[in-house]
Image: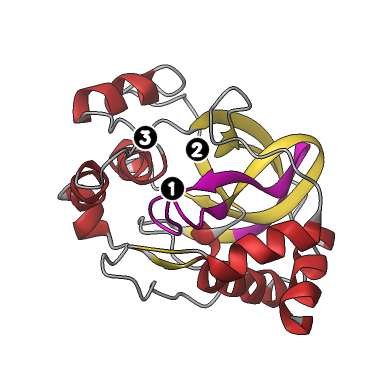
Amino acid sequence: MPTSKKINQGLVKLTKKNINDGRLGEKIKSISGSDKVLTKKELIEERRKIIPDVGIGEDIYIFGYGSLLWNPTINYETQHLAKIYGFHRSFCMKTHLGRGSFKYPGLMLGLDRGGSCRGSAYKLNRNDAIKNIDILFKREMVTGAYKPKLLKTKLDNDQIVSSLAFTVDKKHKNYFNEKDTSMKASMISKANGFLGTCKEYFEYTLESLEELDIIDKEMRAISLHLKNN
């Protein structure tokens, strides 16, 4: 089941070319007080910890639950409605950079422990799977804020596959454990960074979930707060 593809409206467009050219890392390094940017070598080493250069001996899928739903920036064969267990989608990662600032930090989605999560699984072509995975690492792991994992994933046809998913690192300084949706809505409404507003990120993701007929309670609650304020 495909979702509508969108591009962010910020100063730096989140495109495959900009990611490959290192534009994200360059922009982050230019901001005073920003987090350390991982080098190309470090990113490859991080990827090799879970996916070697020769692959894993089976098809690899990418599990999208946030911005990957509407801007995957990778080549893939097919997109499937999918579900993982043991993690749930949550605005649990603060950002002072791409979608926020040090004055008004934004919130990004992560997969936090517990429950389950429905989203999309993108099947990669084996011939260029590693190349596309490395693009995702340059995008999602540019500052090492997430913990990439291979998770068992159930597709809408009941097939069980392995998908790469970016889970939240609870030990990271930007991990946000607040459950108050009104507080989250307030942060999302004010935050803006070089990739655009946090509200745009929220709205694009909510639109994609609606296209997939996925009901997310936290997203719905935050949406109500945003509409009423």
Mark nearer the viewer, 1 or 3: 3
Residue named by callout 2: 59
Q: Are marks 1 and 2 in contact (CB under 8 Å)?
A: yes
Q: Describe residue 19's horizontal placement relative to residue 229 as left or right.
A: left
Residue 99 falls within the magenta-colored stretch: yes
Which residue is denoted by mark 1 in the rendering? 124
Q: Tell me if I can see residue 2 in this picture.
A: no
Q: Secondary structure at mark 3?
A: loop
Quadrant where the N terminus is found in the figure: bottom right
Label 3, label 2: how many angstroms apart (C-alpha)? 27 Å
**From what the image shows, is residue 54 above or below residue 176?**
above
Other residues around mark 3 within 10 Å, as few (<14) / some (14–19) / many (≥20): some
Instruction: Residue at 21% x, 57% y: name it.
Output: 18
* Image location of residue 140, percent across then percent down: 42, 43
Front: mark 3 or 2: 3
Element under disc 1 = loop
**Magenta stretch, residue numbers:** 80-107
Left or right: 146 as drawn, with respect to 187: left
- Look at label 2 and name its amino acid: Asp
Across and down, in percent, residue 128 comes to 30, 43
Q: Position of residue 13 (x, y in %)?
A: 28, 67
Q: Earlier in the sequence, mark 1 or mark 2?
A: 2
